Image (cartoon, grey):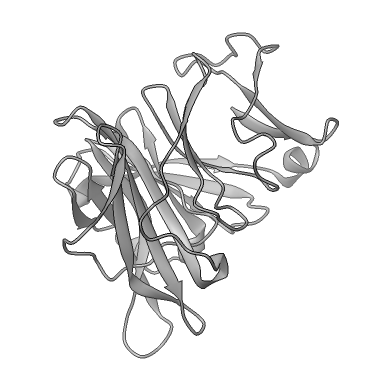
Amino acid sequence: MRYFSTIERKERYLIVRRDASAYVDPVITLGSPFSGRVRYYCRIVGVCNGVVCLSNDLFGYDNLLVLWNPRISRCLTLSTPAHCCDNVWTYKFVFGFGFAIKMRDYKVVKMAYTHGDYQDLAPPKVEVYALSSGIWKEFDGFIPDTGVIEYFWTQAVVCGKVHWTAYKRTGEGRRVENLIMVFDLNDEIFQELSLPEVLVNEIPMNLNAAECRELLVVYQYDIRIWSSSCSIWVMKQYGDTESWSKEYNVALGHEHLMGC
């Protein structure tokens, strides 16, 4: 668990057991490997088998990515991608992290979108890092012409694939259609999955991909900032877009958020 302490004015990290509702020990805190290295908050890209991928892309980016195992207090700073950017304001970055089951290898995928006039230009430039080789390689396969919302994106790793909620622009206007963008970590190919019809024309910023009990999940917020409710959609049979089901609706309540 990661949170910001208003008393100490700094980020804190706690270890939480996934199969329990209580902390393993609420007094045990962890020091972030980014402490003293970045000015602003880092982003948790993803967590897999106890390994955490961190990036400092939340408010700017200087090509710093870290794989961190908090249990044994070890971290690895990844080598600089081949396509690194001196002017961070020219690009938007989206990352994915997970374990390629067939290859038995941890991988990071990086997508760099060029900022255009009023929108990001798709498709992005893509690179893939494999822990076994310790190097980045440029991706030369098919890249879908889709975008991912800046700052708010999250990933979900299900069946050895990374998932993001994404959108495509349609026609001449600013209308968009939402979908799930997928990157297969084993075969290193992009794929797409359809969302429930009711989410296709939702505001992209209101959607987030997640994983729950090894199932693909999408959170649908009523609004992104100061949300009062969140609907949780579950794909009950992976790959079967007809199996999407709205399973939960959670009342969030502003008074609880403001009191934190």
Residue at 55% x, 68% y is 87
Report the front residue among 42 and 118.
Answer: 42
- Residue at screen point 51% across, 61% down: 150
Where is residue 190 shown, x and y percent of the image?
21, 56
Q: Quadrant of residue 140?
A: bottom left
Left or right: 121, with 223 as reference point: left
Residue 9 position, x and y percent, is 82, 36
Q: Position of residue 1 (x, y in %)?
A: 59, 27
Observer able to see residue 259: yes
Percent coordinates x, y for residue 66 in the rendering: 48, 37
Q: Nearer the viewer, residue 6 or 78?
A: 78
* Residue 212 versus residue 154 in the image, above or below: above
Residue 187 lies left or right of residue 65; in this view the side is: left
128 and 220: which is toward the camera: 128
Q: 52 and 259: which one is in front?
A: 52
Which residue is drawn at the image coordinates 19% and 39% (left, top)?
237
Total number of numbered discs in the rendering: 0
- In this orientation, does residue 260 appear? no
Q: Residue at x 42, y 55 (%)?
A: 94
Q: Quadrant of the C terminus?
A: top right
Q: Is residue 223 above or below residue 30?
A: below
